[in-house]
Amino acid sequence: MIAAVKVADMREFLTDAGATVDKVEVTKDGFHITASLGRERHVWVEGMDCKGDGEAQACPEFSISARWTLESAARATAAARDISFAYTTVNTDGRNIELSRMDFIPDGVTRNHVRSAVAEFIELRSAAENAIWPPAKSTRPPKTPAK
């Protein structure tokens, strides 16, 4: 059982799900990880409400997200209607669309629970991208905005 996640945990879970950790930033309040899933496909993980210092911080809250920029605000709003998954939220801001999941684990969960949550989110990221740009209809690879 774990009651918080650390950078090392998230590195492991992201790598197990097929992502490559590209960048880790640690502040006094938490950590931010940028991971790639191939060319121009990313997820971002935020560790929150952390205790400790540096990469040893233990965070009982985390979020994982993916973002895209579409050709118009109307297109982003329409695409958001097609993306509805359990345990996730979808937000739009102009031409931008974000899929995210927040987890709270202060009472403890198994490592496999968090590993599964990360892997599932990465699968949902692909499903969202396919909803935005159905493979049979698009020859243009989607762009992921830099944070």
Image: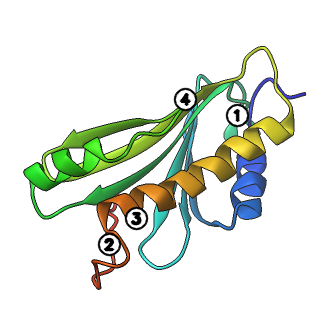
Disc 3 vs disc 4: which is toward the camera? Answer: 3
Q: With 122 as the anchor, is 135 left or right in this view?
A: left
Callout 3 amino acid:
Asn
| Distance (Cα) linking label 1 and label 3 | 39 Å
Callout 1 amino acid:
Asp
Q: With 139 as the anchor, is 23 left or right in this view?
A: right
| Distance (Cα) linking label 2 and label 4 | 32 Å
Element carrying mark 1: loop
Q: Position of residue 26 (x, y in %)?
A: 58, 44
Residue on which disc 4 sits: 29
Q: With 132 as the anchor, is 15 left or right in this view?
A: right
Callout 2 amino acid:
Pro
Residue on which disc 2 sits: 142
Instruction: Name the colour scheme.
Output: rainbow
The residue lying at 74 percent from left, 45 percent from top is 116
Q: Is residue 138 visible?
A: yes
Residue on which disc 1 sits: 53
Q: Position of residue 135 (x, y in %)?
A: 38, 76
Element carrying mark 3: helix
Mark nearer the N terminus (1 vs 2): 1
Callout 4 amino acid:
Asp
Q: Does residue 127 lie above or below 133 as drawn?
A: above
Disc 2 vs disc 4: which is toward the camera? Answer: 2
